[in-house]
Image (spheres, grey):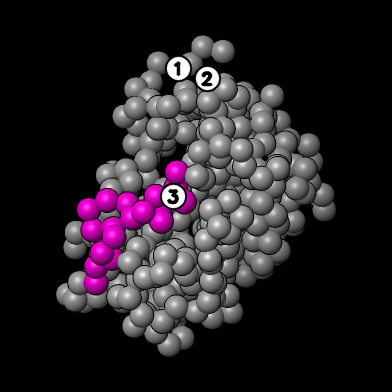
Amino acid sequence: MEKKNLDWGHLDFDYRETDWRYVAMYRNGSWGAGELVEDPNIVMNECAGVLQYAQTVFEGLKAYTTQDGRIVMFRPDLNADRMMDSCKRLEIPILPKELFIEGVEKVVKANEAYVPPYGSGATLYIRPYVFGINPVIGVKPADEYMFRVFTTPVGPYFKGGVKPITIKVSDFDRAAPHGTGNIKAGLNYAMSLHAIVTAHEEGFEENMYLDAASRTYVEETGGANFLFVDKEGDIVIPKSDSILPSITRRSLVTVAKDILGLKVTERKVAFEEVGSFKECGLCGTAAVISPVACVNDHGKEIFFEDCREEMGPVVKRLYDTLTGIQMGQIEGPEGWLHEVK
């Protein structure tokens, strides 16, 4: 299929409408069959559950063109599993895994002309989401839901690409203990908007959130998990029940242990020990890994020596290996690449 006439090498991370999206409805106690539609607009009642009580969950994954010309998605089964967990927590009827996979497959295939060519540095971002659509005025779950999947071609998440960024310690809390920090709900991201706008106004690319209970342990940023490298070259990953279980982070752990032979420890990370690490990266679907040069703690700068000017050596090995697997340059674990045919 002939590709769209886009400047693939200079795309930013923004929404660009593509031709097709996938829609399925939950009514009368069951999910119906999905279909591809052309209309990007949604019509709903002014009292829809999603508008009144934020009953919505979403996912994010990407489609790539590999070195040998295949179109693949990276581990969509894990996105489906996470959406099922998110639905359960927000009292949304659990979306069947097969419906999720069918939706993302069909919408990528239908928008094949928007999948960036290999080597362009761009990807096709896929956004599946579910929300309560019928009128709800009392505080309760909706009765009807819509599942939709759209795609949009994107470039790097951060404007500087993989250049080291500077972040700040936030005075706001991202997620409460025993709350919803470990699911991918829209309400979590709404909570982070004021904090990220404030950070940008102060000249920082992101926030470092500490745990809400004691404000002494590192959790995550608004949209990515942390990964640290200590002086011995070992990887340390913050652990908490209120951290979103990033698919990219989990994949990097496997890459580090099983492919690169590195030691990985997942544990609570006290903020006071952050300055002892040599490297730091933010990992997630959108950015894969973004190196962090510095954390600003209310004016005190904490530098990661091996990431001051460029991606540190351990983080770079992780980045190169994972993106190599995603692009078909490196043989990865079985089942990681899901080909769209």
Frontmost residue, 171 versus 68: 68
The amino acid marked with disc number 1 is Lys
Residue at label 2? Answer: 113
Q: Residue 316: within the magenta?
A: yes
User: In x, y percent, where is residue 148?
Assistant: 62, 41
Q: Nearer the viewer, mark 3 or mark 1?
A: 3
Residue 317, disc? 3
> Which residues make up the magenta segment?
302-320
**Residue lying furthest right:** 29
Q: Is residue 251 visible?
A: no
Q: Nearer the viewer, residue 56 or 96?
A: 96
Picture quadrant where residue 85 is located = bottom right
Crowding around mark 3 (Cα neighbors within 10 Å: few <14, some 14 to 19, many 20+) is: some
As helix, strand or loop, the secondary structure at mark 2 comes to: helix
Is there a contact, CB below 8 Å, between mark 2 and mark 1?
yes
The residue shown at (82%, 49%) is: 30
Does residue 58 belong to the magenta stretch? no
Q: Residue at x 36, y 54 (%)?
A: 313
In the image, taking residue 304 as reference, residue 92 lies left or right, namely right
Residue positioned 40% across, 55% down in the render? 315
Discs 3/2, front: 3
